[in-house]
Amino acid sequence: MNGAEIMKNAMDEFKNIQEYMMLAKEENAVRTYAKLKDQYLLLKVLLASLGVDLTDIDKIKE
């Protein structure tokens, strides 16, 4: 897997995690939200290290 594929996969997963986090927050699923947040933070660090500007795609803003 090359760098572009890794970046695309991470961005797709980042988008999905954010959608699940918003649903979990809406449903007041505290434990689920916390678990998703762990994954969200890992993906955020990975994307930042790959040089992705998260300003426009980060809907959670935590």
Image (cartoon, grey):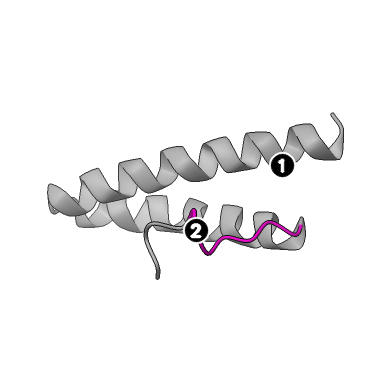
Q: Which residues are magenta?
A: 51-57
Query: What is the C-alpha distance between the residues marked 2 and 1?
Result: 16 Å
Q: Residue at x 34, y 42 (%)?
A: 19
Residue 13 vs residue 37: left or right?
A: right
In the rendered image, residue 17, in percent from the top left (x then y), is placed at 43, 44
Residue 25 vs residue 62: left or right?
A: left
Q: Which mark is residue 34?
A: none
Residue 58 vs residue 54: left or right?
A: left
Q: Residue at x 22, y 44 (%)?
A: 23
Q: Amino acid at mark 1?
A: Met
Majority secondary structure of magenta residues: loop
Residue furthest to the left = 27
Q: Amino acid at mark 2?
A: Asp
Residue furthest to the top = 1
Q: Which mark is residue 7?
A: 1
- Asked whether 55 falls inside the magenta stretch, the response is yes
Mark sitting earlier along the chain (2/1): 1
In the rendered image, residue 49, in percent from the top left (x then y), is placed at 75, 61
**Which of the 4 image quadrants contains residue 44?**
bottom right
Looking at the rendered structure, the secondary structure element under dot 2 is: loop
Looking at the rendered structure, the secondary structure element under dot 1 is: helix
In the rendered image, residue 3, in percent from the top left (x then y), is placed at 84, 40
On-image quarter of the C terminus: bottom left
In the rendered image, residue 47, in percent from the top left (x then y), is placed at 67, 55
Name the residue carrying label 2.
Answer: 56
**Mark 2 or 1, closer to the camera:** 2
